[in-house]
Amino acid sequence: MGFSHRFHRFLRARPQHPERPRPVLLNTWEAVYFDMDLPKLLQLAERAAELGIERYVLDDGWFRHRHNDRAGLGDWFVDESVWGPDGLHPLVDRVRELGMEFGLWFEPEAINPDSDLARTHPAWVLQTNHGPGPDSRYQQMLDLGHPEAYQYVLERISALVAEYGIAYLKWDHNRALVDAGHTPSGRPGVHAQTRAFHRMLAELKTRHPGLEIESCAGGGGRVDLGVIEHTDRVWVSDCIDAHERHRMVRWTGLTLPPELMGTHVGSGADHTTHRSHELAFRAGTALWGHLGRWCRTGTFA
């Protein structure tokens, strides 16, 4: 306990530590996956507001060419073929009318080979002299050590935050850095990549005061004191089985206070383990952190 108290006191004493009560959050992922159906998303927002949700987060699938996980990463423009000429505004405006903040999912360092960005700027992919390593999850990683790549990602995110008044970014990172060299030299690029990532987080917060950012990396892959200097919470794990979460929250909580740990009420049948738990157990488990709702079916059972 003394070990944890020291870490918690240290983190809570930082000037950037979150001070206001943590907004109760809804994430759309398991409710719709890549099905960006506006009526369904609006219905989800209505139900969320009725239950007191305070922050509505639109997950993966909103940007160009992103109809599954094989294409589109890097093309950070709202998909006009899905959303029409008004973009995300009808959804964002209704979310705000209902009294909720709006958040948006990104995986800014990732790039699908099947994307406009990869075809236009192949040298921006982290790679050694023999080229990029094998795809993982149908994706590679951008080399933010290239000033042009860094500026492209920064400006695209910043423009969207400004246009839609985004309050919260879910910043994902789902692929390990393999064959992570800088072109054209082929020199190791991980250190420069990490420094650029931290610098971009800081720049976004400077440009957009009040913006909150979550560090998510396949769940708990980026829970470290370096990233915590620039973010407002971490996503503990993509597994939200309440039984499994007791162990995860216990050990993550050795260093992180509860307000920095994203802990959601999962669906009745868990997405990853397929185990079922009563709502009281799922909700009681999620209370030991920054409470949210990870809705699978579009219902709140």
Image: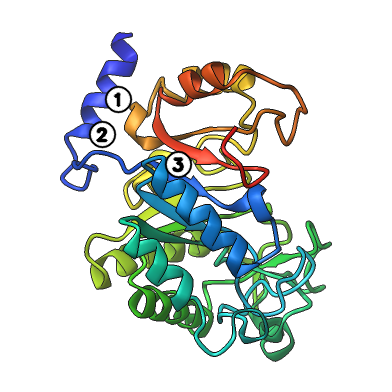
Q: Tell me the residue that label 2 is attached to.
A: 11
Q: In this view, does 19 lie to the left or right of 46?
A: left
Q: Tell me the residue that label 1 is attached to.
A: 7
Mark 3 vs mark 1: in front: 3
Q: Separation of disc 3 and disc 2 at Cα?
A: 14 Å
**Nearer to me, 75 or 81:** 81
Residue 261: where, in percent of width, then height? 42, 34
Q: Residue at (54%, 90%) from the top-left corner?
A: 85
Q: Residue at (66%, 69%) from the top-left corner?
A: 126
- In the picture, the disc for residue 243 is none
**Nearer to me, 68 or 254:** 68
- In the picture, the disc for residue 234 is 3
Q: What's under tag 2, amino acid-wise?
A: Leu
Q: Which class describes the residues within 10 Å of circle 1: few (<14), some (14-19), or many (20+)?
A: some
Residue 288: where, in percent of width, then height? 41, 22
Q: Where is 249 relative to 127, above or below? A: above
Mark 3 vs mark 2: in front: 3
Q: Quadrant of residue 2?
A: top left
Q: In this view, does 301 lie to the left or right of 92?
A: right
The C terminus lies in which quarter of the figure? top right
Q: Which of marks 3 and 2 is nearer the N terminus?
A: 2
Do the residues under discs 1 and 2 have CB atoms within 8 angstroms?
yes
Do the residues under discs 3 and 2 have CB atoms within 8 angstroms?
no
Q: Residue at (73%, 61%) from the top-left corner?
A: 179
Describe the element under mark 1 as helix, strand or loop: helix
Q: Where is 223 relative to 132, above or below? A: above
**Nearer to me, 156 or 291:** 291
Q: Do we see residue 184 in this rendering?
A: no
Q: Do we see residue 18 in this rendering?
A: yes
Describe the element under mark 2 as helix, strand or loop: helix
